Amino acid sequence: MKIAVCVSHVPDTATRIKLGQDGKTIDPDGVTYVINPYDEYAIEEALKTKEKFGNDSEVIIISLGTDSSKESIRKTLAMGADSAVLLKDETERDSFGVAKALADEIKLQGCEIVFCGKQSVDYDNNIIGQLIAELLEYSCITVVVDLKINGSKITAEREIEGGREVVECKLPAVITTQKGLNEPRYASLKGIMAAKKKTIEEKPATEAEHLTELIKMHLPAPKNPGRILGTDSSAVPELVRLLREEAKVL
Amino acid sequence: MANKILAILEQREGLLKRSAFEAVTMAKQLAAELNLGAEAVVVGNEVSNINDIGNYGIDKVIHLKSTELENYSSSGYRDAIADYAKETDADYLLFANTALGKDLAPRLAVALNAGCLIDCVKLDSSSGELIATRPVYAGKALIDVKCNSTKKVITIRPNVFKAKETGSSSNTDVKVIEINSPNLKCKVVDFKKSEGKLDVAEADIIVSGGRGLKGPENFHLIEELANSLGAAVGASRAVVDAGWRPHGEQVGQTGKTVSPSLYVACAISGAIQHLAGMSSAKYIVAINKDKDAPIFNIADYGIAGDVFEILPALTEEIKKVKQE
């Protein structure tokens, strides 16, 4: 079975955001880029699925980005992915454009199961997995924290408000992964050495129409620092009074 | 000519959620600004409070009904809504950005060839064209976006747009459309409720604890304060990664992004990825013994002291004023 994992290369969550000169993106200067944290669960689950289905299975990393994405792709190969495709695109695409290019490649590769992080921590849309699934007419379960695959039947638990939904569907399917699904492995030294011999196939990303357009990026209005009311419990009555009378939230 | 906006409302266990009424209010407002008709659409079986929708300004309600669609089915809900939207040629679909809304909205976008405006915190149509503002990088920045497509799928962040009762004694006109043999290719078969707790994603007040609590055994201080306030319990990434608290409680860039009325951060220093997830709370209270902790830079009110001394006193004081 061919298993696809969609991986994106994003600013680390500790990044302080500064606006870029174009007014539409962030200033990349001094920013550390990493594998999207939610994609790590996707890679781990794909590797576990391969282990389960045996050695005629294959894990293929598919990423849309620029040459800089190779750093993250290389790490996924070191974790144990078999091969990787980088869909090159220097432009800014909307989610639909990203999903379309990924879906085209998944179709070309003939992958029956697709894992991707439930969201990427840059644009936070939470929609790429669903868009890919709809474009390919695959089933799709999002925000998955527990997964069982039996033959072609999938039973997954997805996190929702106040609990977990147990969802059933059949392959082919897209699964979007949430923290808690597994513990992503570290690359072993052997894995890192093996990754050096694996090639990253590069090709241009397929074209797609832009359904949305980013007009500008801006920063939230800075908050005025608040008041320190005291250093011990004697400040509590004043805090409660302010919450009731000034903030009116109690 | 633009024609119609559909507010797609979420019911769970036969009850419309609070965020559903927020979607009604917003759809009504957009309809007025963009000169559109407005309808509310509910998918499910019996929905006990369906007649309340009229109180929020939309009196035409479409109930896409089936016993098999009582619980969520991404394929069944998608097809039922897509069929109705296509039949009536609706240009705008509006959802609350809940777990269900996030899952379903993009599927309808593909079905209708629509652009998606996701997790919006502001919708401005004063230029005659709809411009959405939405947080990115967990709220460290915002973007203004618009759709180039004729059809548009929009989700709004819960708790940001308040549901407003219009006060008119309107009659809700509910039209039931029976959905025969829905597409159940993907369906919910069970729900495992977390133990009787309020979820941070939906709570109006959140009390969160961090590493300064020194161990999971001290989280009862957070739970007691949360109980006195009717609040949800949240946690920082550090305590979730340490295994003290479940991931569902994590607030921040790799947890949940929240916008409650009140956020009480206890023994949380305020790492940038945590601040990103909660700084849009209306009021923030910080209790931390380090007066230089970054959390105080965004807090409205702070006490720079020991949580072990302050939290029990605060819980008592809240109980006292609640009894008055």
Image: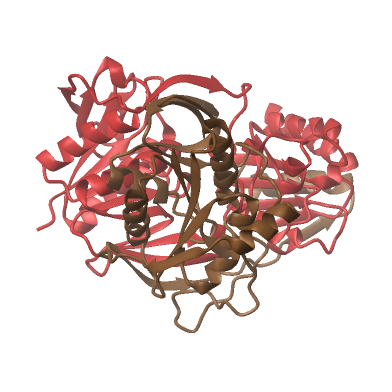
Q: Residue at x 29, y 45 (%)?
A: A136
Q: Residue at x 39, y 68 (%)?
A: A203
Which residue: 48% across, 72% down? A66
Report x, y in % for residue B291.
Answer: 85, 61
Q: Position of residue B124 (x, y in %)?
A: 33, 63
Residue at the bottom extreme, as displayed: A21
Left or right: residue A39 compared with residue B41: right
Of B314 and B238, nearer the camera is: B238
Q: What x and y, as percent, mark residue B43?
A: 28, 28
Given residues A174 and B284, the one toward you in this image is A174
Front position in the image: A194 or B286: A194
| Screen quadrant of the N terminus of chain B | bottom left
Quadrant location of residue B17?
A: top left
Q: Is residue B216 left or right of residue B173?
A: right
Figure quadrant of the C terminus of chain B: top right
Tell me, yes or no, if residue A3 can be seen here.
yes
Q: Is residue A246 above or below residue B126?
A: above
- Numbered label tally: 0
User: In the figure, the red chain has which letter?
Assistant: B
Give the colour in which the image draws chain A: brown
Image coords of residue B248 (percent x, y) = 62, 36
Q: Is residue B204 visible?
A: no
Colouring chosen for the image of the structure? by chain
Query: Camera-side residue: B168 or A29?
Result: A29
User: In this picture, is A95 found above or below A142?
Assistant: below
